Image (cartoon, rainbow, N blue to C red):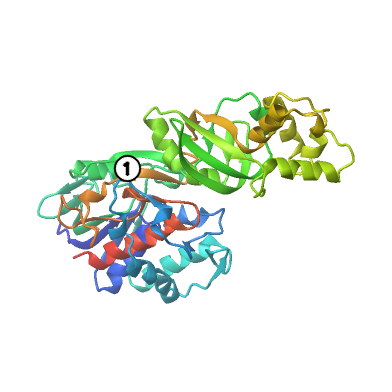
Amino acid sequence: MVIRMKEVVIIGGGAAGLTAAIWAARDGKKVTIIERNNKCGKKLSITGNGKCNFWNQDMSLSHYHSSSDNLENFITKERIDSVLKFFDSLGVIYKVKNGYYYPFTNQAFTITNALILECQKLNIEIINDITVKKIIKKDHFIINPHEENIIAKNVIIATGSKAAPKTGSDGLGYELAKDLGHHIIAPLPSLVQLEGEESYFKNWSGIRCEVEAKAYIENEFIKSEIGEIQLTNYGVSGICIFNLSEEISKALYHQKKVHLKLNFIPFVKDNYQTFLKNINNNSSKKTISELLEGFIHYKLVDIILKKANLQRNLILNSLSNIELNKLINTLTNFEIPITKVHSLDHAQVCSGGIPLDEINCHTLESLKVKHLYFAGEIIDIDGDCGGYNLGWAWISGMVAGKNVK
């Protein structure tokens, strides 16, 4: 039997893999996608609760993270400027809300379908239901030797990370890369919930509130985020918590102490004492619990007062300066020790992956194996919530697909 060599084989039919396939095929390459699921784009189709925030007006590097300081050579202005033109070429109509880009239909399927339709028009071969377990490199690549035995001149690994393994991204791509000589920076949960062991969690479970959340590692301030969080029976969740989780996850992995400080009145820009006294003066002899319930969830009020060691029925004017300052400190610097992050099953993405110094920043070709390329989450780049991780999928898929030889 004659086995015909395939020109470009892409392992993984997610956002990055589909994008790479389209760019390579538009350049005249014969492309094959191998996808372990029964269809491509499974994870993409559920992104953003099915609404698919796929891009952001603010694509600054401050929204991206890597163990390397070489990010600016991978995410460049020229590459950023190419992404929306790519979606225009697919016929995707989008809308912008608070800087976040969504398909006009509010359906992630719109993005997935546009990518798959373009693959079909470009005669890209898609092979489903095959898990790539082994790749051998000789003069060419042999994919799944002794099984499918697929021969390829070029391979792009776009298998994703270990996040959300139910969608097919169980980290197998890391093993393929390791077998081909690459190192792997430990993949850790990112954009994920944070856990603690405080007894009051069961009482505040289900509360949503606007806060400023500050992260501290070994008592050193790291980063803050403002936005809505969800208070849960295990700790805290929400977009601003997710955006703090990348550095926290790494710190906990290295057995460092982590805590959060929550400011439950981030809208107060002036003196906190003045704010409380003005509300008190405008009210008719309210207790401090009644006063706080005007702007804090009633369940949370009990927790705050207990933590401040104050009785519910006290009047604000009866508090000593020490007691008043303790109340203000509890309201604005509510401290929560963080002991762990939620598992990879719950993480939206992973930090870690293929180190940037093992990849050519101009082409995303491996610096260890010729004709081997990487795209998407498998590379040691991850982003904040807000379309940044899909943004990296489009950028990396474009670069790998355009440059595959």
Query: x, y percentage for residue 370?
Result: 15, 55
Residue type for callout 1 = Leu
- Residue 89 is left or right of residue 304, and the answer is left
- Residue 100 is left or right of residue 31, and the answer is right
- The C terminus: image quadrant: bottom left
Structural crowding at the residue carrying mark 1, measured as other residues with C-alpha within 10 Å and reported as few (<14), some (14–19) or many (≥20): some
* Residue 85 at least partly seen: yes
* Residue in front for this viewpoint, 326 or 132: 326
* Residue 124 at least partly seen: no
- The N terminus: image quadrant: bottom left
Q: Residue at x 44, y 57 (%)?
A: 388
| Residue extending farthest front | 321
Query: x, y percentage for residue 90?
Result: 43, 73
* Residue in front for this viewpoint, 301 or 316: 316
Compared with 234, 282 (above or below) is below
Mark 1 lies on residue: 172
Compared with 186, 53 (above or below) is below
* Residue in front for this viewpoint, 305 or 377: 305
* Residue in front for this viewpoint, 331 or 402: 331
Q: Residue at x 56, y 62 (%)?
A: 107
- Residue 6 is left or right of residue 88, and the answer is left
